[in-house]
């Protein structure tokens, strides 16, 4: 093919372009992990932050992570995260369900001790951890915190 | 031998000869840079797809069970689907590209590229089934069931995959050979449906798309645009031209052994932009022929309201053409082809035709200016088979050129013979037209004689 060199060079340029665009965007939500996906997820199910006393809560976006869907509710008092709970969990099959139930308490602890959605995640539950972190971050964004 | 309607004698463009005037409307000039731009864009897109797959990954994900297979599954899905998009674009008959590359070259590229998207997409399905099964610690069969039952749009995606594999299988040469052309073609058209069915699962499940509205948007625009181009140029424009010109057969007369000319009458033929050497796809709307479209070159410039093609009777279809009855309507697609005088780099040309290949050469000649000294070589097995020979001779005479008729058994046109006949071959654009074996041989010879590749143009008449 006569134009083969041009195609190869253009492909390399396309690849480099996407990688460069990606590296220049938001840092990974999972601290320490390799390149993670950029751009905030589009908000789907959201509640307006309710104001009861000084505590406000918001439900983050429903994150579809391949094995299911996860949405997290974050409670904030002032600028401090006081609670994280699961607003919605739907898994594709049994294994994902039991895995999620196992790791969610651990993920909750991580968010509370890090006081942000920038958590390490639990190995062996990578996608669940990511979905949890993204959803928590979007809830924090809605609350205008961190 | 002479036509009652079509008067193919030499007439200066624009003048009136008898009842007919030859109006020259060669159409827009092809811009070769478009082919280069299109190629670069295609490459950029491909690289971007690889980039999307790579940037959607993280080391943690690769280390998880099934992680590597998951990554490869995503990569093959993106790359394979992108190449499928290119496949569709290659045969979408967009005029600016088709004018430069020619429908025959585009089809050849389409056929050559074909194994890649289908292999990548099949690999994608296998890899992801394995990966998800690994991660969920279930068996592969159970995973397939889970995909189809619980994941959005996976049922349609699976149907799409089955259709694609069926199309691929029927296109394997040994199987395609055994099928009737219409059967193979009808199956092949389902590819549009398969691609449409698969779209939803890409957007709903692809890690590069979930949560990435910009990427989703670009991918959607890409596919919507491709669909639009196909609707307009592959289907819309041919329909429009068919109804605008309303061609119908008026006369079928013999030109030589087993060869006939078909003259068609149509409306607004002065508005049909066609260059000498181009062809149309002809669909004669009569019993036994309406489901097939075959490419035939015009064997002369249109003389409104008449068009002429000259067909050699090989195979059932071509023989049926000889029996066409006047009044038969015709549906057309085109004109297509880059085998025109626009492709020239030099002002002088050498035209080499084998057998029925003379039809394209004959109409190409009419586009050449006076006194341009063309050299024409006509090759045939016998003198009767030198169809349209007198027309060619007259056209060449008016252009102060010369014709060489090489008649005889299927002996090779040897290197020394060719350079004897055309000593200044290297300063000419060479046009070769005829059956595949003939074209391959002549083109190889011409390249060996030092004619640069860009100056060699060919049109293969497949039987």
Image (cartoon, rainbow, N blue to C red):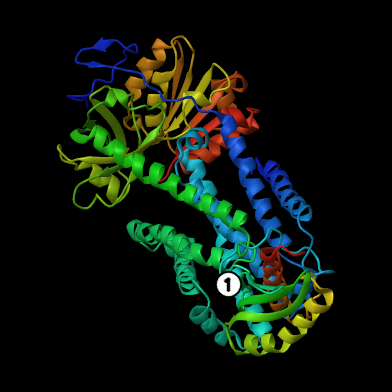
Q: Is residue B73 left or right of residue B442?
A: right
Which quarter of the picture shows residue B58?
bottom right
Q: Where does residue B425 sit, x and y in percent of width and height?
A: 59, 22
Q: Secondary structure at mark 1?
A: helix
Question: Which chain's residue wears label 1?
Answer: B
Regarding residue A47, the answer to whether it shows in the image is: yes
x, y percent for residue B81:
56, 59
User: Which image quarter holds the N terminus of chain B?
Assistant: top left
Taking the spot 30% from the left edge, 34% from the top edge, the residue there is B310
Residue placed at 61% from the left, 88% from the top? Answer: B139
Q: Is residue B122 above or below residue B216?
A: below
State the residue lying farthest toward the front: A53
The one nearer the camera, B53 or A65, is: A65
Residue that label 1 marks: B125
Task: Answer whether residue B415 is visible to the viewer in this image.
Answer: no
User: In the drawing, does residue B231 fall left or right of residue A125?
Assistant: left
Residue B144, how many percent across, how many down? 54, 81
Nearest the camera: B301 or A121? A121
Q: Is residue B261 above or below residue B41?
A: above
- Looking at the picture, tell me which residue is in the foreground, B62 or B141: B62
The residue nearer to you, when weighing B258 against A6, is A6
Q: Quadrant of residue A107?
A: bottom right
Q: Is residue B406 above or below residue B177?
A: above
Residue in the image at 68% along x and 51% along y:
B47
């Amino acid at each position: 093919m006569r134009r083969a060199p041009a195609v190869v060079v253009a492909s390399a340029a396309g690849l480099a372009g996407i990688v460069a665009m990606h590296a220049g965007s938001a840092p990974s939500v999972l601290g320490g992990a390799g390149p993670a996906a950029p751009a905030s997820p589009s908000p789907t199910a959201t509640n307006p932050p309710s104001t009861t006393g000084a505590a406000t809560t918001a439900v983050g976006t429903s994150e579809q992570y391949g094995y299911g869907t996860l949405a997290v509710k974050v409670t904030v008092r002032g600028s401090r995260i006081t609670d994280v709970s699961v607003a919605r969990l739907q898994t594709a099959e049994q294994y994902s369900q039991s895995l999620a139930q196992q790791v969610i308490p651990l993920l909750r602890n991580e968010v509370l001790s890090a006081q942000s959605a920038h958590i390490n995640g639990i190995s062996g539950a990578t996608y669940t951890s990511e979905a949890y972190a993204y959803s928590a971050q979007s809830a924090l964004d809605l609350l205008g915190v961190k | 031998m002479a036509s009652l309607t079509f008067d193919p004698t030499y007439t200066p463009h624009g003048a009136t000869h008898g009842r007919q005037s030859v109006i020259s409307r060669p159409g827009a000039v092809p811009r070769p840079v478009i082919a280069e731009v299109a190629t670069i864009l295609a490459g950029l897109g491909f690289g971007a797809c690889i980039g999307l797959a790579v940037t959607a990954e993280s080391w943690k994900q690769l280390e998880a069970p099934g992680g590597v297979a998951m990554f490869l599954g995503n990569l093959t899905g993106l790359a394979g689907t992108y190449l499928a998009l290119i496949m569709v674009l290659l045969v979408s008959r967009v005029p600016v590209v088709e004018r430069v590359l020619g429908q025959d070259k585009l089809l050849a590229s389409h056929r050559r590229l074909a194994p890649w998207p289908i292999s990548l997409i099949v690999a994608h399905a296998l890899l992801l089934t394995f990966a998800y099964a690994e991660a969920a610690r279930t068996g592969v069969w159970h995973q397939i069931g889970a995909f189809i039952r619980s994941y959005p749009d996976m049922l349609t995606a699976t149907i799409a995959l089955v259709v694609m594999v069926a199309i691929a299988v029927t296109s394997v040469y040994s199987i395609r050979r055994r099928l009737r052309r219409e059967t193979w073609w009808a199956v092949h058209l389902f590819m549009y449906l398969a691609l449409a069915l698969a779209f939803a699962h890409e957007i709903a499940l692809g890690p590069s798309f979930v949560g990435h509205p910009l990427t989703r948007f670009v991918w959607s625009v890409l596919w919507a645009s491709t669909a639009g181009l196909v609707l307009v140029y592959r289907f819309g424009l041919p329909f429009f031209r068919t109804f605008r010109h309303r061609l119908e057969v008026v006369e079928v007369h013999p030109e030589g052994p087993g060869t006939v000319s078909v003259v068609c009458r149509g409306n607004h033929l002065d508005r049909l932009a066609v260059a000498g050497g181009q062809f149309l796809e002809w669909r004669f709307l009569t019993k036994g022929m309406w489901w097939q479209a075959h490419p035939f070159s015009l064997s002369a410039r249109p003389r409104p309201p008449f068009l002429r093609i000259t067909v050699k009777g090989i195979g059932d279809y071509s023989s049926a053409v000889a029996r066409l009855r006047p009044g038969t309507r015709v549906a057309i697609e085109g004109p297509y082809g880059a085998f025109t005088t626009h492709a020239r780099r030099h002002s002088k040309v050498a035209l080499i035709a084998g057998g029925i290949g003379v039809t394209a050469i004959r109409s190409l000649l009419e586009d050449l200016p006076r006194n341009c000294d063309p050299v024409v070589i006509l090759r045939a097995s016998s003198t009767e088979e030198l169809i349209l020979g007198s027309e060619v001779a007259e056209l060449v005479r008016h252009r102060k050129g010369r014709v060489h008729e090489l008649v005889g058994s299927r002996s090779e046109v040897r290197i020394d013979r060719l350079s004897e006949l055309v000593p200044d071959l290297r300063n000419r654009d060479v046009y070769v037209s005829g059956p595949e074996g003939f074209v391959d041989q002549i083109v190889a010879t011409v390249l060996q004689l030092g004619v640069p590749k860009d100056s060699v143009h060919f049109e293969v008449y497949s039987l």
